[in-house]
Amino acid sequence: MWCVQYLLTPEAWSSWGGCGGACSGMEPLRGCPFLEDSFTRFSSQSNVYGLAALPGAARGTGRGTGGKEKWEPGLLVDAEIVSIDTFNKSPPKRGLVVGITFIKDSGDKASPFLNIYCDYEPGAEYNLDSIVQSCLNLELQFTPFQLYHAEVQVGDQVETVFLLSGNDPAIHLYKENEELHQFEEQPVETLFPELKELPSNVLWLDVYNIPDSGRRITAFGCQSGYVRVSQVEQASRAVLQSWSIQQDGPISRVLVFTLPSSWHEGDLGGAPALDGKENVLQSGLQDQLILPASDQHDSVLCALVTDVDFDGEAEILLGTYGQELLCYKYWRLGTHGEFHLLWKRTFASPLLSMEYADLTCDGLCELAVVCLKGLHVLQHSLTQTAECLLERLRRRAAQQAA
């Protein structure tokens, strides 16, 4: 039963850089850098699509546990919430957009819906209390899975659209109609030709726009174990390259990212028992790295790529059904590299989803972890963080004095 979802509100980062590589160039922190800050028990169970971080411009009057923002989009009676996502409109447009998919029990049948919340009144585009009152309700003809947003080039401007996977199997695209001031479904192949003719239900989709190239990498994993990665020219919508591979089980998570130090375009990670496909644009899906011990804790249900040790290089975080949070670091040795398990942390129930965002408005990001029994919020150790900051200040002072 899917009923509990969370929207988390990060605020502005501190002037010294927050968690975005504040201590770049320093030795990474050793061991798990997080301490438990709070735990909120669920009255019912969430799922792998049940967590999204609100962009920092959002504001509202409701307060959650520990003073955090709490956004309540009305009571969905007799409904099971499936997935949730949110984004800020691409400039020059303004406004926060929130999407929620749910299945409503009407007695004789279960009907799936997509609610899109967006306020067009000037001055209210980021006000959560106003946004919750402006809802577009769309009935779906399929069972929804992941709700995802992606930026795409439309003419001479950038648009952000919703992409929703379903059991048809298909990916459905929802784009804003500026004249009608609402979102509407459009054929996905007009903007994402690589997402048509799917062989199976897509469980996870990731779109990575390669900086300063006019190209993107689109990767998705299916219930059947099928994985496809495509390189697409943004302006012409031409599919330049495409690779696929068949795994022996459902693909719970696919992420596209760049490896530290090497900065090869489009490195790919797929779970469970996460395989790192190194340098996809050169080697396709043939050059594979296995994350050590990632197959020893049951299925990998969630993954995150972010810098949690303040060295300016991202780590891979895996959350498993076996109740373990695993952290991996990529180390390059000559012309090759490998991932090492830095640390792991045990939870009381399976991990379903993760977000890394500044929830306490102190300039440091927290790690929000949705588990089977509730929401854990993990904070950085203030002692380790203070040592890191002081060392960085000492080095900067020494450089200026030299």
Image: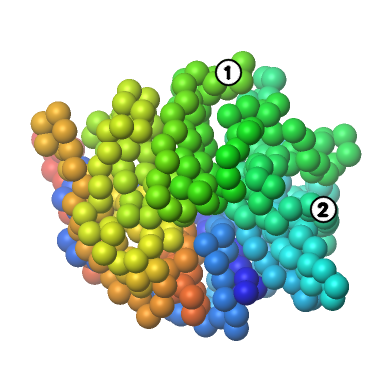
x 37%, y 25%: residue: 281
Specify the quadrant of the image occupied by residue 257. top left
Say left or right for 118 vs 27: right
Residue 245 in the image, given as x and y percentages of width and height: 41, 37
Residue kind at label 2, given as amino acid type: Leu
Q: How is the image coloured?
A: rainbow
Q: Quadrant of the N terminus?
A: bottom right
Residue 402 in the image, given as x and y percentages of width and height: 11, 35
Residue kind at label 1, given as amino acid type: Ala
365 over 150 or under it: above or below:
below
Query: What whole-number distance in Å separates the C-alpha atoms at marks 2 and 1?
Result: 31 Å
| Count of numbered badges drawn on the protein | 2
- The circle on residue 138 is 2
Q: Residues within 10 Å of mark 2 (few under 14, many from 20)?
A: some
Can the viewer see residue 264? yes
Q: What kind of element bears circle 1?
A: loop
**Dot 2 and dot 1 residues touching (CB under 8 Å):** no
Q: Please name whichever residue, 391 or 153, is drawn nearer the observer in this view of the structure.
A: 153
Q: Please name whichever residue, 6 or 105, is drawn nearer the observer in this view of the structure.
A: 105
24 over 140 or under it: above or below:
above
- What residue is disc 1 on? 238
Q: What kind of element bears circle 2?
A: strand
x 61%, y 16%: residue: 236
Residue 353 in the image, given as x and y percentages of width and height: 48, 63
Can the viewer see residue 64? no
x 63%, y 59%: residue: 83
- The circle on residue 348 is none
